[in-house]
Image (cartoon, rainbow, N blue to C red):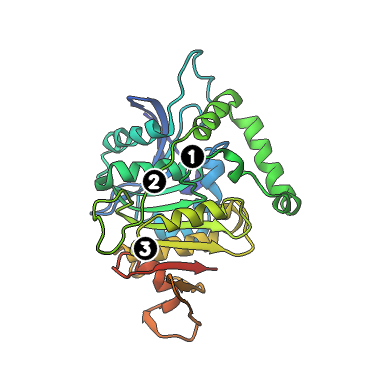
C-alpha cells in the first residue's frame, strides 16, 4: 500500500494507490476519501488511450466538484497496464475482455470495503461499468455514462470528428502528448483491441405489461454526450434500449467528445442533480440548466420561469434529480 500526499493536487490526495489482484489480473486503483454513513463510493473507469488523470483530472479538480467529493469517497480504477509509467505487460499475456474487466470490479469493491458504488465511466469505461451493473445490480446504486456505445461495433464512433479536430488543436495536442509520453503504447494497443472486440450489451427496454425480467439496467442512469460528439448516435441508441423511468439523456450543446474536459462545470451540475435525485446532497447549492422532456409522442419545453420544486432547483433540472420516480417517459436534458 502506498500513501501519497501532494498539496498541489488536493482532489486526488491524500490517496491510497494499490494494484488490486483480481481473477483477471491486477488493476491499478487510486482510492481517496473515507466512507461516510450509508453513502456509496464514486467509482470511475477511463476510456481507451486515457487513464484516471487524463480522463477525469479536469472534472475532479474543478472547484464545483468539491461539493460532491467531500461527501463521497472516490475509487479510480485503471485497466491493466494503463496507468502512468506502466511496464509492458508480459509476453504472451492475454488481455482481459471487456466482460472480464467488468467482473474484476467486485474484487475491487471487496478490497476497499465498499458496499456499493455510483459508477462514472467514459467510452470503454462506461461500457465496462454498464456491464458490471447488469451482472451485479446489488453493487451499483447509479451510473453516469459518458459516450457509451452498447453495440459490438468498432472504435470509429469514438474518434474525433473533423470539426472537433479543427477547433480543438490545443486540447488534442495535449492528449496526444500525454498518450505518447506517459502511457505504455503496447499496453494501450491491447486495451484498444479488447474494446474493439467487445460484445453488445444486449439490453432491452421494458414494456408496460410485458416481461418484467428483461435484461436492462436496474439503477438510475444518466447518459451524457456532446451534441458534436461522434458518439451521439450510439448514446441515443443506448437510451432507446434502457428503462425510461430510470434513465436521463443529457446532450451538451457546443461540446465534442470530451464533455468532462470541455465543459466540466455543466457535467458536475448534472452530476449533482443526479446524486440529489438518489437522496443525497439535498442542500447542495446548484445553478440551473435548461431541459426538455420527451415522450414517444410529444416534446415539452420548460422555461426558467416555471414552477420550482425545491430550493435552488427549478422544474427543468428536476428531470435529472427525479429519474428514480416511475414515469413512463424518457427525460432528455439539453444544456
Q: Nearer the viewer, residue 22 or 151?
A: 151
Residue 77 higher or lower than 312, as above or below: above
Residue at (46% x, 63% y) in the render: 270
Q: Quadrant of the C terminus?
A: bottom right
Q: Which residue is mark 2?
A: 130
**Residue 8 visible from this viewpoint:** no
- At a point 73% along the width and 54% down the height, the residue shown is 163
* Residue 171, x across and y down, in percent: 68, 48
Q: Which numbered dot is residue 244?
A: 3
Residue at label 1?
A: 152
Mark 3 to mark 2: distance in Å?
A: 16 Å
Left-right relation of 191 to 202: right
Residue 213 horizontal/vertical position (percent): 24, 51
**Horizontal and vertical percent position of residue 196:** 53, 34
* Vertical relation: 141 (above or below) 19: below
Q: Are marks 1 and 3 in contact (CB under 8 Å)?
A: no
Amino acid at each position: 500500500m502506498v500513501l501519497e500526499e501532494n498539496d498541489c493536487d488536493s482532489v486526488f490526495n491524500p490517496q491510497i494507490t494499490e494494484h488490486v489482484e483480481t481473477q483477471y489480473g491486477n488493476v491499478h486503483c487510486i482510492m481517496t476519501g473515507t466512507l461516510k454513513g450509508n453513502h456509496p463510493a464514486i467509482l470511475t473507469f477511463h476510456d481507451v488511450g486515457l487513464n484516471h488523470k487524463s480522463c477525469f483530472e479536469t472534472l475532479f479538480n474543478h472547484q464545483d466538484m468539491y461539493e460532491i467529493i467531500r461527501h463521497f469517497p472516490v475509487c479510480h480504477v485503471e485497466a491493466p497496464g494503463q496507468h502512468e509509467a506502466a511496464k509492458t505487460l508480459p509476453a504472451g499475456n492475454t488481455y482481459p475482455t471487456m466482460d472480464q474487466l467488468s467482473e474484476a470490479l467486485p474484487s475491487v469493491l471487496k478490497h476497499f470495503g465498499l458496499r456499493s458504488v455510483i459508477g462514472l465511466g467514459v467510452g470503454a469505461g462506461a461500457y465496462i461499468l454498464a456491464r458490471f451493473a447488469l451482472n451485479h445490480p446489488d453493487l451499483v446504486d447509479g451510473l453516469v455514462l459518458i459516450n457509451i456505445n452498447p453495440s459490438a461495433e468498432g472504435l470509429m464512433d469514438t474518434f474525433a470528428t473533423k470539426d472537433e479536430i479543427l477547433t480543438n488543436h490545443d486540447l488534442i495536442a495535449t492528449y496526444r502528448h500525454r498518450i505518447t509520453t506517459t502511457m505504455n503504447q503496447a499496453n494501450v494497443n491491447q486495451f484498444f483491441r479488447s474494446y474493439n472486440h467487445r460484445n453488445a450489451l444486449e439490453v432491452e427496454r421494458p414494456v408496460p405489461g410485458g416481461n418484467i425480467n428483461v435484461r436492462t439496467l436496474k439503477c438510475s442512469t444518466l447518459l451524457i454526450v456532446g451534441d458534436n460528439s461522434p458518439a451521439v448516435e450510439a448514446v441515443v441508441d443506448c437510451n432507446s434500449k434502457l428503462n425510461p423511468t430510470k434513465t436521463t439523456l443529457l446532450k451538451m450543446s457546443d461540446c465534442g467528445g470530451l464533455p468532462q474536459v470541455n465543459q466540466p462545470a455543466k457535467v458536475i451540475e448534472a452530476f449533482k442533480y443526479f446524486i440529489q435525485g438518489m437522496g443525497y446532497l439535498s442542500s447542495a447549492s446548484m445553478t440551473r440548466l435548461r431541459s426538455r422532456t420527451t415522450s414517444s409522442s410529444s416534446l415539452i419545453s420548460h422555461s426558467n420561469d416555471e414552477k420550482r420544486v425545491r430550493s435552488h432547483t427549478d422544474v427543468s433540472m428536476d428531470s435529472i434529480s427525479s429519474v428514480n420516480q416511475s414515469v413512463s417517459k424518457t427525460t432528455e436534458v439539453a444544456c
